Image (tube, helix red, strand yellow):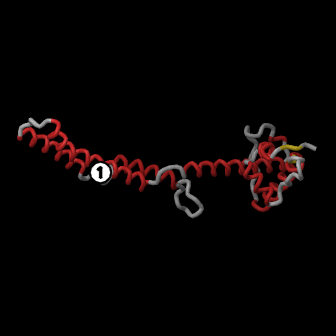
């Protein structure tokens, strides 16, 4: 009898350790007793039986011969069917990974709020320049100070509409939000 760790069994079945735990909790895979370790042979057969039962319930189709499964043309329909179910399980695992990665992205509202904070900070710094200039250069003439004030107010006028993100940022966020919508969750809300 072959025995192994839970990770060995997961690798053997091409599943995650989490999925092995789930299948064990469902009674599909057999938990080792004591210090025996996992029985790879028994659990492989149990997993194949589970996939067969699952395929009867879901009506999964057998994929055509392909280079994904060398020699699949000579394999029995049951083996091809099990392979198809395994591919579906692997695809679902990758989909879950992608969904988890999407949750690490910033929502559009957060990006816009950060942009607004940056603009407010820039306004404050521009307003502070005139006072700093008068302290640093006390010998400036009134006309020089007026010219500096005029340039600063022009810069502030350019920022007055900056509470709304520039069209380029809005276009990017809308395009990206469309990509997120393509991977909507079960309630059709974008992931993330």
In the image, 190 versus 122, the foreground residue is 122
Q: Position of residue 166 (x, y in %)?
A: 32, 49
Q: Where is mark 1, residue-wise?
A: 120
Residue at image coords 25%, 45%: 125
Q: Secondary structure at mark 1?
A: helix
> Against 22, is 137 above or below?
above
Which residue is at the far right?
1
Q: In which quadrant is the N terminus drawn?
A: top right
Q: Position of residue 57 (x, y in %)?
A: 78, 62
Residue at image coords 35%, 46%: 168
Label count reads 1
Q: Residues within 10 Å of mark 1 (few under 14, many from 20)?
A: some
Q: Position of residue 51 (x, y in %)?
A: 80, 54
Residue at image coords 82%, 44%: 5
Residue at image coords 73%, 37%: 67
In this rendering, position of residue 70 left or right of residue 98: right
In this rendering, position of residue 187 left or right of residue 55: left
Q: Position of residue 44 (x, y in %)?
A: 85, 48
In the image, 120 versus 20, the foreground residue is 120
Q: Quadrant of residue 133?
A: top left
Q: Quadrant of residue 30?
A: bottom right
């Amino acid at each position: 009898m072959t025995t192994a760790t839970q990770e060995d069994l997961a690798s053997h079945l091409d599943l995650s350790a989490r999925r092995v735990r789930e299948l064990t909790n469902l009674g599909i895979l057999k938990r080792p007793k004591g210090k025996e370790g996992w029985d790879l042979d028994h659990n492989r057969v149990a997993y194949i039986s589970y996939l067969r039962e699952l395929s009867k319930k879901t009506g999964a189709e057998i994929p055509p011969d392909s280079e994904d499964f060398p020699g699949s043309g000579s394999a029995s329909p049951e083996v091809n069917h099990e392979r198809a179910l395994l591919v579906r399980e692997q695809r679902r695992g990758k989909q879950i990974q992608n969904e988890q990665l999407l949750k690490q992205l910033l929502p559009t509202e957060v990006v816009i709020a950060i942009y607004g904070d940056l603009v407010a900070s820039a306004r404050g710094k521009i307003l502070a320049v005139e006072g700093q200039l008068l302290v640093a250069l006390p010998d400036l003439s009134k006309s020089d100070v007026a010219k500096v004030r005029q340039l600063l107010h022009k810069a502030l006028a350019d920022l007055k509409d900056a509470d709304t993100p520039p069209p380029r940022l809005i276009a990017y966020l809308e395009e990206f939000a469309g990509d997120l919508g393509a991977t909507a969750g079960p309630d059709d809300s974008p992931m993330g």
